Image (cartoon, grey):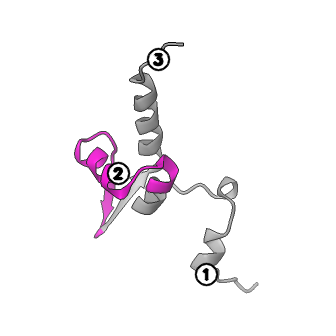
């Protein structure tokens, strides 16, 4: 059986529901959280958003994104009606 090689563009065109990465690039975290690059790095520097380094590449674990959003929800102030 011959193996099919997929280009990066093939993977990028797949719907998110069929492939959920464990580690996200900074740009992907920016898109998912709807934050600027500056804000993402501020959150990481403050320790509110965890990241890992793989060589020179910085990645944000999926669990870190989930924990960050959970932390925001827990600290959200209810607006008066």
Residue segment shown in magenta: 30-56
Q: Position of residue 27 (x, y in %)?
A: 44, 62
Q: Is residue 7 above or below residue 77?
A: below
Q: Which residue is mark 2?
A: 40
Q: Earlier in the sequence, mark 3 or mark 1?
A: 1
Q: Secondary structure at mark 2?
A: helix
In the image as oriented, which residue stretches furthest toward the bottom? 2
Q: Which class describes the residues within 10 Å of circle 2: few (<14), some (14-19), or many (20+)?
A: some
State whether residue 78 appears in this view: yes
Q: Quadrant of residue 21?
A: bottom right
| The C terminus - image quarter | top right
In the image as oriented, which residue stretches furthest toward the right? 1
Q: Is residue 71 above or below residue 77?
A: below
Which residue is painted at 34% across and 51% down in the image?
A: 40
Going by the image, does 50 lie left or right of 22?
Answer: left
Q: Which class describes the residues within 10 Å of circle 1: few (<14), some (14-19), or many (20+)?
A: few
Which residue is painted at 43% across and 36% down in the image?
A: 67
55, 73: nearer the viewer:
73
40 drawn magenta: yes
In the image as oriented, which residue stretches furthest toward the front? 81
For the residues labelled 2 and 3, the Cα–Cα distance comes to: 24 Å
Q: Position of residue 24 (x, y in %)?
A: 46, 58
Q: Which residue is mark 3?
A: 78
7 drawn magenta: no
Q: Nearer the viewer, mark 3 or mark 1?
A: 3
Q: Earlier in the sequence, mark 2 or mark 3?
A: 2
Q: Position of residue 15 (x, y in %)?
A: 69, 60
Q: Nearer the viewer, mark 1 or mark 2?
A: 2
Which residue is painted at 41% across and 20% down in the image?
A: 77
Q: Which residue is mark 1?
A: 7
For the residues labelled 3 and 1, the Cα–Cα distance comes to: 46 Å
């Amino acid at each position: 059986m011959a193996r099919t090689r997929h280009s990066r563009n093939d993977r990028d065109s797949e719907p998110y529901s069929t492939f959920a990465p464990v580690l996200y690039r900074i740009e992907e975290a920016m898109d998912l959280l709807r934050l600027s690059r500056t804000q993402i790095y501020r959150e990481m520097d403050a320790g509110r958003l965890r990241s890992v380094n793989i060589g020179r590449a910085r990645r944000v674990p999926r669990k870190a994104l989930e924990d960050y959003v959970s932390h925001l929800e827990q600290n959200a102030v209810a607006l008066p009606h």
